[in-house]
Amino acid sequence: MNKYPWQGMEIRIHPLFWFMMFLSVWSGYFLEAITLFVLVIIHELGHVTAAWSYGWRIRSMELLPFGGMAKTDEWGTVSAREEIVVALAGPFHHVWLIVISYVFYMMGFWSQDWMAYFIQGNLMLALFNLLPIYPLDGGRVFAAVLSYWVPYRQCLYWTGVISLFLSVGLFVSSFLFPGVTVHFPLLLISFFLLFSNVKAIRQKQVQFIRFLLHRHYQGMKDDYAIQKVIAMANEPLAKVIKRWYKERYHVVEVVDERGNIFGFLPEEMVLQKYFQNPNARLVIDFPDF
């Protein structure tokens, strides 16, 4: 593990972030734009620090107008609890920032108007990021919680579909603000979220294969609950593993059309056979599987 959370991490700034900063400065809100920049960095460092504490490998951090995205290989391969903690670490940092702003106001360092703006900015970033839309923090929390209840392949699909639907809602709402024809910043953000979720839906199989590869080569924890998966003899393995959960150990019960049990296959054996031949099927000749 690196000595510091940011050590060896590449920092990128999304073009949309620069565009939003330009609009703020051009409108005469230079100080407000700098404040937003600092808040976004602190927000993202919250994620990075939490991920670093769990030993995650952080490749890069990209700053966005509403927060940021930490590029890491661990999403989808660690426990849902870790993913929830890392996702909520960013919004949590806004809590102590709000407390500090109030302390500064009480000490006479800040005016009431500046404290109000600072609190408003923190609340805006925190609450917006908690929307259940991928890749926002709330979307990641939603996916992690959903993985407890549905198979992981379905979790990826429904997270993408629901996030896409809500992104469309944001797009429509950008035209419904009173007093303006269109809320341009929200319009740009909704476009980004729409693009991100279309991409996520298209790549759900890639993410699922990463999950399976991690299980295959790294194994699973000893405290996983056992999940029995009933499968028909000669059923494709690719279909069987789509019914697997993220944090459970799977035992495949092979049956025939009458429900007669041929035997049981442990998860390791199914994964080994699948990666040898993704088109393989569960065979009736159980000992030779």
Image: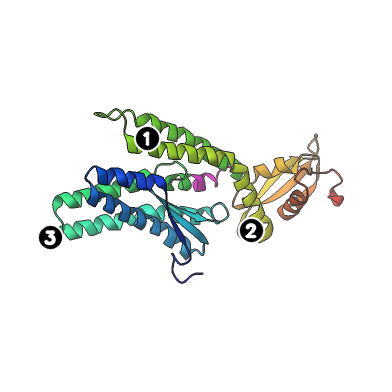
Mark linked to residue 220: 2
In what element is the residue under mark 1? Answer: helix
Q: Is residue 269 visible?
A: yes
First of labels 2, 1 by sequence position: 1
Mark linked to residue 108: 3
Give, as a three-letter code, the residue at label 2.
Met
| Residue 253 picture quarter | top right
| 2 with respect to 90 (left or right) | right
| Label 2–label 1 contact, CB within 8 A | no
First of labels 3, 2 by sequence position: 3
Mark linked to residue 187: 1
The residue that appears at 35% across and 58% down in the rendered structure is: 42
First to last magenta residue range:
143-150
Disc 1 crowd, CA 10 A, few/some/many (<14, 14-19, 20+):
some
Disc 2 crowd, CA 10 A, few/some/many (<14, 14-19, 20+):
some
> 217 or 248, which is in the foreground?
217
